[in-house]
Amino acid sequence: MDSLPATPQTVATYVADLAGDHKPSTVQRRLAAINGAHRLAGVVSPTADEEVRLVMQGIRRSKRVAPAQVRPITVDDLRRMWERFPTISPVSATGHCC
């Protein structure tokens, strides 16, 4: 029995099983690896099949993960960033100095 190409049903079942213990991003990375293995073998990848896509949509919907909040840049942060730039001579629109 050949393992490639995998059937869409096999991949959908595998993905659904992974979703029990993993985040959607991890499941998506596994799908990308499956897709890559199929491409390298020169066979059609089942990862684009509607059955697999629907299972993945359901996983994302049921395991919504809020994006991590990042602290906004403040005026003080911008000033510190600006201070790190070297001093630049004024240049006209033509690219010539003064």
Image (cartoon, grey):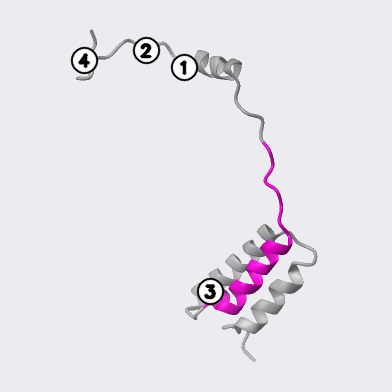
Q: Within the image, what quadrant is residue 46 found in?
A: bottom right
Q: Within the image, what quadrant is residue 55 found in?
A: bottom right
Residue at horizontal 65 percent and vertical 66 percent from the top: 30
Q: Residues within 10 Å of mark 3 (few under 14, many from 20)?
A: few
Numbered disc 2: secondary structure: loop
Circles 4 and 1, Cβ within 8 Å, touching? The answer is no
Measured in 3D between alpha carbons, the distance from the residue under mark 4 to the one under mark 1, in whole angstroms, is 20 Å
Please give the residue where the numbered disc 1 appears in the rendered image. Answer: 85
Q: Residues within 10 Å of mark 4 (few under 14, many from 20)?
A: few
Residue at horizontal 80 percent and vertical 64 percent from the top: 21
Please give the residue where the numbered disc 2 appears in the rendered image. Answer: 88
Residue 56 sits above or below residue 46 on the image: above
Numbered disc 3: secondary structure: helix
Circles 4 and 2, Cβ within 8 Å, touching? The answer is no
* Mark linked to residue 48: 3
Magenta-colored stretch includes residue 52 = yes
Measured in 3D between alpha carbons, the distance from the residue under mark 1 to the one under mark 2, in whole angstroms, is 8 Å
Q: Residues within 10 Å of mark 2 (few under 14, many from 20)?
A: few
Type of amino acid at the residue the image marks with label 2: Ile
Mark earlier in primary sequence (4, 1): 1
Residue 44 sits above or below residue 89 on the image: below
Please give the residue where the numbered disc 4 appears in the rendered image. Answer: 96
Magenta stretch bounds: 45-69
Mark earlier in primary sequence (4, 2): 2
